[in-house]
Amino acid sequence: MTTVLIVDDEYLIADILSFALEEEGYLTVTAGNPLKALEIIDRERPDLIITDFMMPSMTGVEFAEAVRLRPGHSQTPMVLMSGAQAHMGVERSDLFIDVLQKPFDIDEVINKVRGIVSPD
């Protein structure tokens, strides 16, 4: 099954994304902070990571840089979700395959995820 890791310190947003993607046939795993997400990625081996920008302990860009350094994750597709800092994700196309503006349209998110990875 295709696994999507959602990293966001706003649990309501993570839950909304998780529920919507699971309805579409994806397996989702959520992490409330980047440090927890780094623990999860080696165990869960996600096919896609969706991360927020503003979080405790590190930004979404710092998290993405840390993911790229982990064995087996140099090519894992990542999507950045952000409001005011979305331009930082666009500037880092080496890290992010796409950038979602907050607030987001859930149908747009589902379509973007579907375009990157398809559910099994």
Image (tube, grey):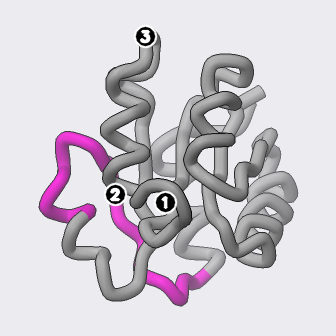
Decide: marks 1, 2 in contact (CB < 8 A)? yes
**Could you give the CA–CA distance between mark 1 and mark 2, rounded to whole angstroms?**
8 Å
Q: Nearer the viewer, residue 118 or 48?
A: 48
Residue located 77% across and 43% down the image:
29
Quarter holding the C terminus is top right
The amino acid at mark 1 is Lys
Residue under pointer 1 = 112
**Could you give the CA–CA distance between mark 1 and mark 3, rounded to whole angstroms?**
26 Å
What mark, if any, has residue 98 been given in the picture? 2
Decide which of tag 1 and tag 3 comes sooner along the chain: 3
Decide which of tag 3 and tag 2 comes sooner along the chain: 3
Residue 87 locus on image (x, y percent) = 21, 74
Residue located 54% across and 53% down the image:
50
Decide which of tag 1 and tag 2 comes sooner along the chain: 2
Residues in magenta, as a range: 89-105
Residue under pointer 3 = 71
Q: Nearer the viewer, residue 63 or 45?
A: 63
